[in-house]
Amino acid sequence: MKPKVSIIVPIYNVENYLSRCLDSLLAQTLQNIEIIAINDGSNDSSIKILREFELRDSRIKVIDKPNGGVSSARNEGIRIATGEYIGFVDPDDWANPIMYEEMYKNAINENVDIVMCSYIREFEGHSKIKDFNLPNKVCYLNEEVKTNFMRRLIGPINDEIANPEFLDAWGTVWSKIYRKELIVENKIKFMDLNKIGTNEDTLFNIEASYYSKSFLFINSPFYHYWRANSTSVTSGFKPKLINQWMYLFTYIENFIKDKNMDKDYYLALNNRICLNTLGLGLNTINKDNRSSVFQKVKRIRSFLKEKRIKNSFRKFNLSQLPMVWRVFYFCAKIRFATVFYLMLICIEFLRKVIR
């Protein structure tokens, strides 16, 4: 029988978390699923754990491949998926037992291409629900998918700027299921992180939402996003990030041009570029960056002087931001690198204390 949902799990050196993730998938109340576990060249005991789970349940399909990165692993999973819908789970996260039953049921009942749920951020010792401040269900059809969902993925406009922390909250793939035909027929794939650095999820969703005729948001936190994994490949210092993000921004801009989108999409991208100076800054002060404080400040000053970032800040409306963020991004706008650096240190401290 054809699976209702194919769940793709890219795996690289996650022996401490993998069993928890797979147990949560095997416990799904939606029984007719396939779990495609892609071992992406792990050199710990991940493959041993996968083989043990494979023997336990025939719904688990283990693919062992040389390391190629998370995008390569997910693309391989898409290639062999046989379900009506496709979902993604990261191997250090886990899913509520009713997640896929509820999302699939809503997908079928509402006849939608993409279903998204909210999620819970999990830390050592406490949890925090991501509050999207929306009704229980929100559905977009046809052009509404682009204007209300895809544009938001590209970047915020108007009063959305007031919440920079929501910049990529909509862009995750693990909070969604996608009609398989939508992905396959439009040849949507994940881009190599060596090219773009991060945001492969957002790019995937931009393309998926462009071709989608329907999108449903369910305001229920079915997914558990583990934030305490210090060994995650996303947590280290990325020395090439500024160049990779310039490539990312150009790619999105070309997509907007090719699809003849209106000025709101260009404004959204412009605002993303400005808000992303926070990410560039946090990457610079990352504990894995062994440079001196002087070198870090110099690096910050260098990317704030980058032509594209300077031009974006000329059009950026600071008045939409809360006061603290207004001061922070004003320092970025006038390229006051030393104060920008000091504020980054405070932001990083507060991220760890408050979370």
Image (cartoon, rainbow, N blue to C red):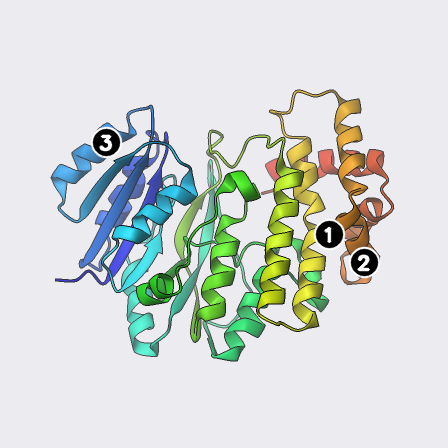
- Between discs 2 and 1, the one toward the N terminus: 1
Q: Which residue shows up at 48% across the image and 54% down it?
A: 172
The circle on residue 147 is: none
Check disc 2 and report the residue beneath it: 318
Image position of 102 with respect to 274: above or below: below
In this view of the protein, which residue sits in the foreground, 114 or 20?
114
- Can I make out residue 277 in this image? yes
Q: In the displayed structure, would residue 41 be above or below residue 91?
A: above
| Amino acid type of the residue that numbered disc 3 sits on in the rendered structure | Ile
The span from disc 2 to disc 1 (Cα, nearest Å) is: 10 Å
Residue 49 numbered mark, or none: 3
Local SS, label 3? helix
Asked whether, in this view, residue 119 is left or right of residue 312, the answer is: left
In terms of image quadrants, where is residue 20?
A: top left
Sequence-wise first label, 3 or 2: 3
Do tag 3 and tag 2 residues touch (Cβ < 8 Å)? no
Residue 96, given in percent of the width and then of the height, sits at 33, 53
The residue where tag 1 is placed is 274
Label 1 CA crowd tier, 10 Å (few <14, some 14–19, many 20+): many
